[in-house]
Amino acid sequence: MVAGSSAVLAGLGGWLPPRVVGNAELAARLDTSDEWIRSRTGIAERRVVDDGMSTVDMSVAAGGRALRSAGVDRVGAVVLATATPDQPCPASAPQVASRLGQGEAAAFDVNAVCSGFVYALATAAGLIAARVVRDVLVVGADAFTTLLDPDDRGTVPIFGDGAGAVVLRAGDPGEPGAFGPFDLHSDGDQAELLIVPAGGSRQPRPVEPRDRYLRMEGQAVFRHATTRMAESSRAVLDELGWTVGEVDRFVGHQANVRILSTVAKQLGLPADGLVVNIDRTGNTSAASIPLALVDGVRDGSLRPGDRVLLAAFGAGFTWGATGLRWPDLDVDPL
Ligand code: ACO
């Protein structure tokens, strides 16, 4: 890479809605239990948006913290990874940019569902490498609970809402915080395994009322997620020239603690190298990796100089991975 053309992590922030929904609250209205949810997913509680709170609201809160962490007021572009924009049209990123006082900065959404944050990082790194802009605010935010059938015990315990954000600036490939390489893939043949059938151009209005909700084949998703996250991680490690033993921390999309430990096992990573916060967030889709990064910094598991591997898997299917050496950052707690 040419000097000045790498995307370097310069700031990090996250935000969770205040309403906490514990497993006991779900067990009181669904045919489930705290024991089932904890043992099958690792989740104890999740945060849920109140009526009227949106993806843009959460993105503004997380984005403001990331800008403060980076010590900058303005960026050249805002890239928002989300599958739950405030409206189907227009994209939500321009509203995030306006509310954060970003003037006429370029702003657009990226939808790769739970892989969205890794896809958005790669997109932002491309904008910097092509010298379109010098710095980018990348936000991963989802109000995924708005897509769930409130009576579906198969999905309600798993998902939560939230937003995480990073500021990337142009820098050199050898610097701490320089992202890359990126490995990104998709398989649209598997779209039906994790889908909201209605609300798009194919089925604008639900034929059946439940068509407006997320449908998930949990076991199939589990199998694909573990295989693909491990494959993508290996591809990035090869490119970086890192051995598995040299990875200090693995920050995977927080879909299920069993998915994370299976990926670690497949890669040969020790379980204590995982950064895990799904116990108190649930699966927050595009927000999950930056929220885990915030918690990792705050609890001391991510330290300057650490070799960090990130990997994600989401509906589509989409998946991807990247790596970086952790920089020194000041980060507010969630
Ligand atoms: N409480 C109690 N029982 C339940 C619940 C619940 N909430 N949900 C399902 N069950 C039952 C099932 O009905 C089944 O009962 P049966 O044996 O009588 O038929 C039993 O529990 C076992 O069900 P499984 O589906 O086999 O449970 P599994 O161990 O596979 O766990 C889970 C299910 C947690 C959904 C798991 O498959 C998983 O995590 N999959 C991946 C999901 C995921 O990560 N999705 C997000 C991907 S990222 C994105 O882009 C959004």
Image (cartoon, rainbow, N blue to C red):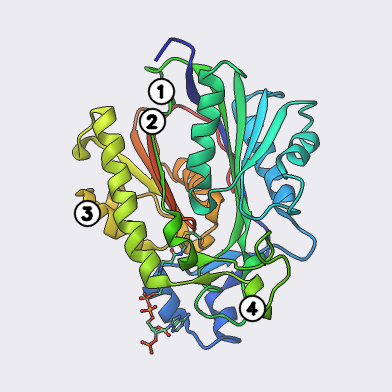
Which SS class for mark 3?
helix
Instruction: Give the label on residue 210, or none.
Output: 4
Q: Earlier in the sequence, mark 1 or mark 3?
A: 1
Name the residue type under label 3.
Gln
Identify the residue under disc 1.
Answer: 176
Residue at image x 54%, y 18%?
130
Name the residue type under label 1.
Pro
One can see residue 10 in this view: no
Which one is closest to the eye, mark 1 or mark 2? 2
The location of residue 294, given as percent across then percent down, is 51, 43
Q: CA distance from mark 4 to mark 1?
A: 47 Å
Name the residue type under label 2.
Leu
Q: Earlier in the sequence, mark 4 or mark 1?
A: 1
Q: Is residue 116 above or below residue 123?
A: below
Q: Is residue 126 above or below residue 272?
A: above
Which one is closest to the eye, mark 4 or mark 3? 4
Which SS class for mark 4?
helix
Name the residue type under label 4.
Arg
